[in-house]
Amino acid sequence: MKLAAIPLHEVELAIEPHRVPELSFVIPAFNEEENIAETIRRVDEEALTLVRSYEIIVVDDGSSDTTFERAKMMAADTPLRVLRLSRNFGKEQAIMAGLEASTGESVVILDADLQEPLHHVATMLKHRSEGFEVVYTVRAHREDEPRLKRLFTHVFYKMLNLGSEAEIPADARDFRLLDRRVVDALCSLPERNRFMKGLYGWVGFRSMSIPIELEQRAGGKSKFGFRGLMKLGLTGMTSFTNWPLRVWTLIGMGVAVLSILYGIYIAAKTMIFGIDVPGWSTLAVALFLLGGVQLISIGVLGEYLARVFIEVKGRPGFIVAETHSQKKS
Ligand code: UDP
Ligand code: MG
C-alpha cells in the first residue's frame, strides 16, 4: 500500500473514526409499531450510500404500543439511539428532543411513516454543499386532501403570515435538512410553546426548498385529527402573531364611531319627526351582538394568557424517560 501518496488528514480520518457524524436523522414516532423497523432499515440503507458516518435518532413520543421495543431491536446493527419520552408530548416536542440529542454536522428530520421519499436526502445534501443551511421540502400539491381542509390550511397560513416577521411557507414539511448552526439556534430558544414550522423560518439562515410528492402512509393511521390540528394551529397563531390581541381596539373604535353616528341620527330624527315607536329589536340585537363580540375578545385574550402562563411556569417541553443506544464495540 502506498501510504505516502495519501494526504495526511485522510490517513487520520481512516485511523480514527469520526467523533461527530456527518449526518443525524431525527425520527419522531408515536404509535408507529407497524412502520418503525422498516423506516429505520430504509434510512440506514439510504445513509450508507450518502455519507461516511451517520446516526439515527428515534424519539418515541410516549407510544402505547411496541414502537420503543421494535426500534430498540434495530440498534444491534445500526448506529441508532432511541429516546423514550415519558408521555406523549406531541410531534413538535419530539422533534426538539431529537434535535437536542443529535450531534451530526447536519440533521435531517423525517416522519416515521415513510410518507416522505428518502431519495430527496441526496438532493438536500447537494444543496447543503452549495452553502444552504436549511433545505426544506414543500408538498408539490394537496390534491389528496379534502377541499375543506385545503381551504382551512390556506386561510390559516394567510392569517398566520399577517403579523409574522418571517414568512412561514404554507406547504413546508418538517422533512428537512438543518445545518448544525441552525439546530443550535433552535435548541437555544427558550420557549416551550413550539410551532416548529414557524421557528424554522424565524431563526432564518440561507434556505432552499425542494418540491416533493408524498407517498401513502406505510401502515397505521395519521396521528393528526381535527383536534390535533386545531391545537397546533392555536400554538402557531399565539406564538407568531399578536394582531388577534390588537384587532379588538380597532373593532371597539369602529363600534363606538358607528354608535355615535347612530345616536346623532336618532336624536335628529326625534327632533324632526317626534317620538317614534321604541326600537326594542335594534336594542336587543345590538346587546347580543356586542355581548358575543366581547366574549370572543376575552377568549382571545385568554388564549394568549394561557400561553404566557405556560411559559412563566418554566416546565421543560418534554421529559426523556430513557435512552437506548448501540453498544460501543
Ligand atoms: N408524531 C409524534 N407525536 C405525536 C403525533 C405524531 O411524534 O403526538 C409523529 C408520527 O409518529 C409521525 C409524524 O409525527 O412520525 C407525523 O405524523 P402523521 O404521519 O400522523 O401526520 P400526517 O402525515 O398525517 O400529517
Ligand atoms: Mg404521515
Image (cartoon, helix red, strand yellow):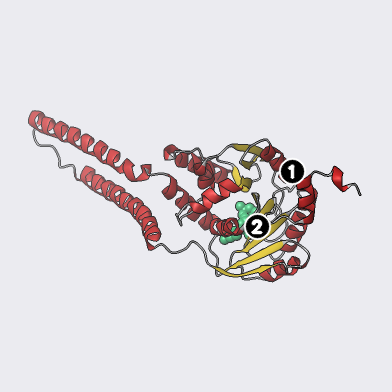
Label located before the other in sequence (2 or 1): 2
Binning the other alpha carbons within 10 Å of mark 2 as few (below 14), some (14 to 19) or many (20 upward) gives many
Dot 1 beta carbon under 8 Å from ligand 1: no
Of all residues, the one furthest to the right in this rendering is 1
261 up-or-down from 283: above or below: above
Where residue 88 sits in the image (x, y, percent)?
55, 65
143 left or right, relative to 225 = right
Residue type at mark 1: give it. Answer: Ala
Rendered residue at 57%/43% (across/down): 150
256 up-or-down from 273: above or below: below
Toward the viewer: 194 or 22?
Answer: 22
297 left or right, relative to 46 = left
Q: Quadrant of residue 263?
A: top left
Residue type at mark 2: give it. Answer: Ile
- For the C terminus, give its image quadrant: bottom right
86 left or right, relative to 110 = left
Q: CA distance from mark 2 to mark 1?
A: 17 Å
Dot 2 beta carbon under 8 Å from ligand 1: yes
Residue 265: tell me if it is visible.
yes
Toward the viewer: 156 or 94?
Answer: 94
Binning the other alpha carbons within 10 Å of mark 1 as few (below 14), some (14 to 19) or many (20 upward) gives some
Mark 2 in CB contact with mark 1 (< 8 angstroms): no
138 up-or-down from 11: above or below: above
Where residue 135 sits in the image (x, y, percent)?
63, 41
Residue 122 numbered tag = 1
| Residue under label 2 | 27
Where's ligand 2: which quadrant?
A: bottom right
156 left or right, relative to 206 = left
